[in-house]
Amino acid sequence: MCHVIPQWEDCETIEEHVTPQWSTGTAQWSTLTAHLSSLKPQWRM
């Protein structure tokens, strides 16, 4: 994920928060997924 979105300087921190979300709920993950979907155009090289 980090190498795909270099503008996320705190990517490692984000991943640390995303991992535990799987056991607590998918609300945060859904929000992150929606955010990633909005960034897809920036992934094209």
Image (cartoon, rainbow, N blue to C red):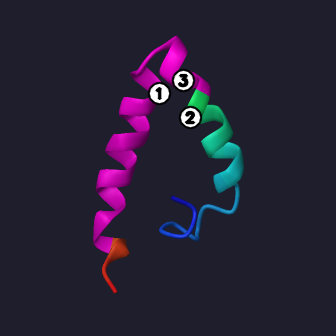
Residue 44: x and y, percent?
30, 79
Residue 36: x and y, percent?
38, 52
Q: Is residue 44 above or below residue 22?
A: below
Badge 2 vs badge 1, beta-carbon distance below 8 Å: yes
Residue at image coords 48%, 68%: 4
Task: Say if the magenta span includes residue 21.
Answer: yes
Quadrant of the snapshot with the C terminus: bottom left
Give the SS element for disc 2: helix
Q: Which residue is mark 1?
A: 28
Q: Is residue 20 left or right of residue 36?
A: right
Q: Name the disc covering residue 18, or none.
A: 2
Badge 2 vs badge 3, beta-carbon distance below 8 Å: yes
Number of numbered discs present? 3
Badge 3 vs badge 1, beta-carbon distance below 8 Å: yes
Magenta region, residue range: 20-41
Give the SS element for disc 1: helix
Give the SS element for disc 3: helix
**Circle 1 residues within 10 Å: few <14, some 14–19, many ≥20:** some
Predominant secondary structure, magenta span: helix
Q: Is residue 17 left or right of residue 38?
A: right
Q: Disc 2 and disc 3: Cα gap in Å?
A: 5 Å
Residue at image coords 58%, 69%: 7
Q: Which residue is mark 3?
A: 21
Q: Disc 2 and disc 1: Cα gap in Å?
A: 8 Å
